[in-house]
Amino acid sequence: MQIMFYFVITSALSFTKLILRSCKIIRDVMSHGGLNIVEKGKNDLQTEADRCAQRCIIASLSSQFPNITIIGEEESSDCDVPLDWVVTEADQEVLKLELPPHLENVDLKDICIWVDPLDGTSEYVQGLLEHVTVLVGVAIGQRAVGGVIHQPYYKDDKNDILGRTIWGINGVGFGGFTPVAPPDGKRIITTTRSHSDCTVQAAINALCPDEVLRVGGAGYKVILLLEGKAHAYVLASKGCKRWDTCAPEAILHAIGGTLTDIYGEYYPYNSETTHANLKGILATAAGQNHRWYMSQIPQEVKEKLKQ
C-alpha cells in the first residue's frame, strides 16, 4: 500500500510532466485568444483554459487511479480527451523520498485529490498572469498532506524557462522554491483583490498592517507567504473553496506555516466534505504567531461569517 501511495502522491505532484502539460494548455488558450468566458456567478469566471486544463489533469490521474476520489473546480465533461493530454509518468525524484510513519499503509479510499485547474481566472482574463496558478492537493482523511502549485507565467531572471512548480509534502519535504522569512519590524497582509467588502476590510484593519497586497488566487497569496513577501493571508469571506486551499495548505505546513479558518480550525478535505470554505481563511508564514492573528479578528467579523 505504501508503494501505491507513493505513485498517487507523485502523480498528483508530477511537476515534470502532468502539471507542465496542463500549463501549456493554459498558455495555448491565451495565445490563441479563444477564452470562451462563462460567468458562473458574481466575480466567478470560467474559461476554455479552466475546462481544458481540468480535463488534462483529471483524465491523467483517473487513468492510473480509477478508484481514488478526484474533485475538480469545474464540472466534469464527457468530451474525449486528446491522447497527448493524458500523462501517466510519475516523478522519479519524488519517489525517492522517505515517507514518515503516518503516511505509510494508507487506505486508498481515504485519499482525495483536489484540483483547481486555473486559480485566478479573473486575473487570467484581465492579463494579470503572474497571479495565475494551477493547484493539485492530496488529502488523507481530513488533512491536506501534499500539494503542488505551478505558475505557468513565472519568469526566472536567471534563465529563459517560462513557468515554475513548487511542491510540498507535510512531514516529508518541499521543493521548487527557497523559503524566506517575512521582514521584521512591519506587518504585510495579503488578501483578495476582487471579493472585498466591509467585513473583509474590518478584519484587515484590525491587524493594523503596514502594507496590504491585494492579489488574485489563493495559490499566489500563499506563495507570497512562502517567499517572505507577506506575513499573513486574511480573507474574512465565504468565497474560497477546498480546491483553492488544499495544495497551498499542505505546502505551507511543510515549511512550518499554518492555514486555518478565521476561528483557527483546520478545514477537512475528505471526499464527503462540503466544497465551500464558509469560515474564511487565515494563513500565516512560518515563524508567525498564528494565534495572535486569530485573536485580533473582531468578534463581529467572526459572527458575520456564521450567518
Image (cartoon, rainbow, N blue to C red):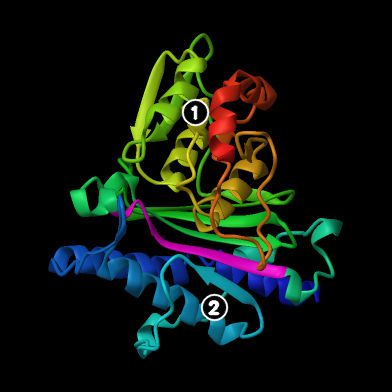
Residue at (70%, 69%) from the top-left corner? Answer: 111
Which mark is nearer the camera, 1 or 2? 2
Q: As displayed, is residue 126 above or below residue 199? A: below
Q: Look at 13% across and 66% down and name the residue there.
A: 33
* Residue plotted at (49% across, 53% down): 244
Q: Position of residue 44 (x, y in %)?
A: 33, 55
**In the image as oriented, which residue stretches furthest toward the front?**
307
Whether residue 91 sits left or right of residue 159 in the image: it is right
Residue 71, relative to residue 41: is it above or below?
A: below
Evaluate whether residue 136 shows in this view.
yes
Q: Position of residue 119 (x, y in %)?
A: 39, 54
The residue closer to the viewer here, 114 or 186, is 114
Q: Nearer the viewer, residue 228 or 37?
A: 37
What residue is disc 1 on? 228
Q: Quadrant of residue 41?
A: bottom left
Q: Quadrant of the C terminus?
A: top right
**In the image: residue 42, left or right of residue 116:** left
Q: 290 or 240: which is nearer to us?
A: 240
Q: Is residue 119 magenta?
A: yes
Q: For the magenta stretch, what is the residue range?
A: 111-121
Residue type, numbered disc 1: Gly
Residue at the farthest top position: 185
- For disc 2, the marked residue is 61
